[in-house]
Amino acid sequence: MQAQYTTAKKITLFFVAALLLAAPVHAQTLKASSTQITIGRVIGCNDSRHITLTSTSTAIALNAAITYQSGDVHGSWLYVRDMSTGNTTSSSTAVHSTVPATPSNGLDLKIGLNLANLGAGNDKASLVLTTTSPAGQSITINVAYKGDLNCAGVTSDNGTISAEPGGLVLTGLAGQQPNAYVLVAYS
């Protein structure tokens, strides 16, 4: 009876040890809030996007670099900026950044248009994030530029702005501030 108990105990301990060895030991994982973004050319509206990088545990050091499609004629039309340090790149020369440990708000990266006169065409590039400590993880964020991407409330119509009255002369006595109302309309 004692021999059966000892054998069962050894088998149980063996399986527990095997499960513990197979389980990850608090693996750090880099996560991005988005892996696909589209930017346009309307400055202050759609010419950049922010993504947030987070860690599942301790801080993660990484390099961020941009790769362009083969044959891209526009060159360095895209940039990435680490908003905590201001470090910026628009090429395969990487900037070094650190994602803070959990809990935190993460690392804010701004991805934006580098050349405002890129035109109405379309382009694609990739932001490649590669961890250096711990090494071995990477995330690719695909970036599409669409020159005809619209913004809500912003149009490219060259309409007419008019003011009523057409001419305005203000006069007043010394020490007083004259005022008048002007109606501005767009058509």
Image: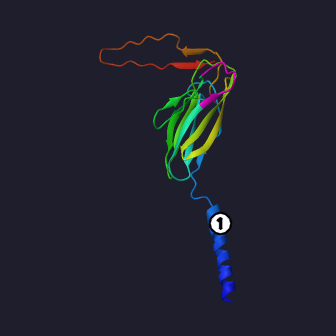
Q: Which one is in front, 185 or 130?
A: 130
Stretch in magenta: 66-75
Residue 50, given in percent of the width and then of the height, sits at 57, 36
Q: How is the image coloured?
A: rainbow
Q: Is residue 19 above or below residue 132?
A: below
Q: 50 or 97, which lies in front?
A: 97
- Name the residue that disc number 1 marks: 19
In the picture, the quarter occupied by the C terminus is: top right
> The residue under label 1 is which amino acid type?
Leu
Q: Is residue 44 above or below residue 101?
A: above
Whether residue 61 is visible: yes
Extreme residue toward the front, this view: 3
Front residue of 165/121: it is: 121
Residue 14 percent across, percent down from the top left: 65, 71
Residue 83 location in percent, x, y? 49, 36
| Quarter where residue 186 is shown | top right
The residue shown at (54%, 40%) is: 62
Which residue: 38% across, 12% down? 171
Image quarter hosting the N terminus: bottom right
Q: Percent position (x, y) of residue 20?
A: 62, 65
Residue 70 in the magenta stretch? The answer is: yes
**Number of marks in picture:** 1
Residue 53, picture quadrant: top right
Image point (60%, 30%), residue name: 66
- Above or below: residue 3 compared with residue 103: below
Q: Is residue 29 magenta?
A: no
Name the residue at 41% across, 19% down: 179
Secondary structure at badge 1 equals: helix
